[in-house]
Image: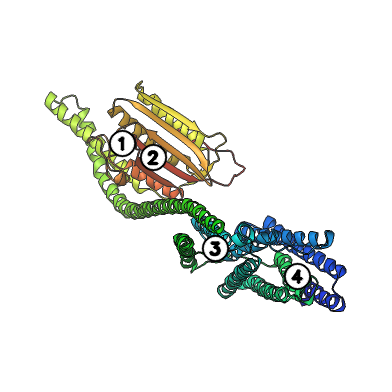
Amino acid sequence: MSPFARYRWFVLAGAVTLGFALVSALSRPGHAITAFADVLELALMGAAAGFALANGITKPGSEGRFWQLMAFGFSLWTFNQAAWTYHEILLRQQIPDPYFADIILFFHVVPLIAAAAWRPDQLKPEHGFQLSTLNFLMLLVWWMLLYAFIVFPHQYVAVNKDAYDKYYNGLYDLENLMLAVILAFAVWTSSGAWRRLYLNLAVASLTYSLSSNLLDTAVARGSYYTGSPYDLPLIASVSWFAATSITAREWHLEPSQAPGYGKWGAVASRLASLAILSLPILGLWTVLVDRSPAPSRLFRLFAVLIAMVTLGVFVFLRQYMQDQALIHLLEDSRRTYENEQRLQSHLVQREKLASLGNLVAGTAHEINHPLEAILGHSENLWSNQRLSGEQDSLVRKIVTQAQRTRDLVSDLLRFAQQSSAEKTMVDLSTLLNRGVQMLELQRHDSRIKVETAVEPNLPRVLGNANQLFQTVAQIVDNALDALEEAGGGSLQVSARRQGDEIVVQFSDTGPGIREPLRVFDPFYTTKPIGKGTGLGLSAAYGVVQDHKGQITCQNKPDGGALFILRLPVAAEAPEQALGAKA
């Protein structure tokens, strides 16, 4: 894109300004030049408001809020100009002084200051957005109080034209100076397209501030008329605002990190606090120093009282919001700490299982050979009919203990063999239903109630059906054991999709887990001797890790244990889902 095409709207703004300068220089004071200037200024202000509003509607997030505030300020400006146009063109009257539209003109700068101080070029937390909004509202109320306290008594309560013009112009110039300073600071602390935007707005603002001072001087000398060369800076500034608003639609405005946001947010908060502290000072000045007419003093006292009540409510809201932000921060810190602990325990558990698995594999094979010989010879001896009763009892014990040892060795080998098995598409809903039904039928305990709630159309996972079935069976079997020891209860098995994972929960009403952090440790068991080896859940943990999943356990606040199994959703394949084999 050529430079002319890129800056075509600024070129047009310059052409409009130059055209107005020529018309103003060649025209004499009269209704024609007044009408021309009023209509042109109204059109330019309306264009600036319209372009800013379009940006506020189409732009996302903080940038959209920035342009909405700008559009509000430009709209107030347009309303004031419309009132001027109505009086000077349609009524052909001089603008009264004081004039009600002066209030609109005064407050049109406040949304512009808010937009500049909003700093949409900086990334801010959500609670920062809320506190910034509240601080802005507090400063807005304080600024309204200043107008009501300083200007309004001379405007309507006890009319004094000279005092009104003096205080109004001084306060309005202070407003424009604040806007220019804030925009200049934004230029200094921003970068990229945002700096370009702030720079154009700052130049336009400074031009308007110059225009305001020139107009005030010309009015005081009696040499001003609408459409005179004194309006030239006003036309230039409004044209520049409009050109900036429409050209900014083509700029890539992206927010960035704001290392100094907390510091400047604190400054805004302190300014709001100073605004509150100034209220009693203004009240004391009114009572002790002010020599204005009694109606003006009474009006000022009521204005201070209303501002104190309003700002008091804002202070309460700000403290409440800060407390809520602190609570959320503490909760986030707690969750982060718990997640780090959980991750650390998973890493330790994984390394522990890997090293122990290598040790157990070699040891189990070495034990298995002599054990098979002991079991075979003892069974042959047991089948000998010439044994006495005492010998038969001893051989029976040898066989029983040898079989128990063989089962232990089998568990050790199964625990050690946690290498990746062949994986296919597995339907977890079918696997869960089969596993729960099989174990429930084996128990035949009417005191235990098992409920299954599986989400319809549950996606499949990529895994080994037999390994996942053994994992589910191990968790359910442990839960049923706990419920039997407790004299009954219920077990709820649920499965649902959560994002890109399948979440399976096993929730029972038993006595809970004595040491949840050790439940996946090898050889850890709370069952009586001879009933468990403490390797089942360790093997289940290894299976889940091999399937790129996660398994956790915890005690519920209302009692009972909760196991949570998470497995990633697999990309659908053309093969049919494979269920678990019983």
Q: CA distance from mark 1 to mark 3?
A: 79 Å
Q: CA distance from mark 2 to mark 1?
A: 11 Å
User: Is 365 located above or below residue 528 in the figure?
Assistant: below
Q: Residue at x 74, y 59 (%)?
A: 50
The residue mark sitting in front, 4 or 3, is 3
The residue mark sitting in front, 1 or 3, is 3
The residue type indicated by label 4 comes to: Ser
In the picture, the quarter occupied by the N terminus is: bottom right
Q: Which mark is residue 441?
A: none
Label 1: which secondary element: loop
Q: Residue at x 16, y 27 (%)?
A: 392
The residue type indicated by label 3 comes to: Ser
Give the side of residue 306 with respect to residue 345, left or right: right
Q: Earlier in the sequence, mark 4 or mark 1?
A: 4
Give the side of residue 323 with respect to residue 138, left or right: left
Viewer-nearest residue: 299 or 503? 299
Q: Earlier in the sequence, mark 2 or mark 3?
A: 3
| Residue 117 seen anywhere in this rendered image of the structure | yes
Label 2: which secondary element: strand
On the image, numbered disc 3 is attached to which residue? Answer: 292
On the image, numbered disc 2 is attached to which residue? Answer: 563
The residue mark sitting in front, 4 or 2, is 4
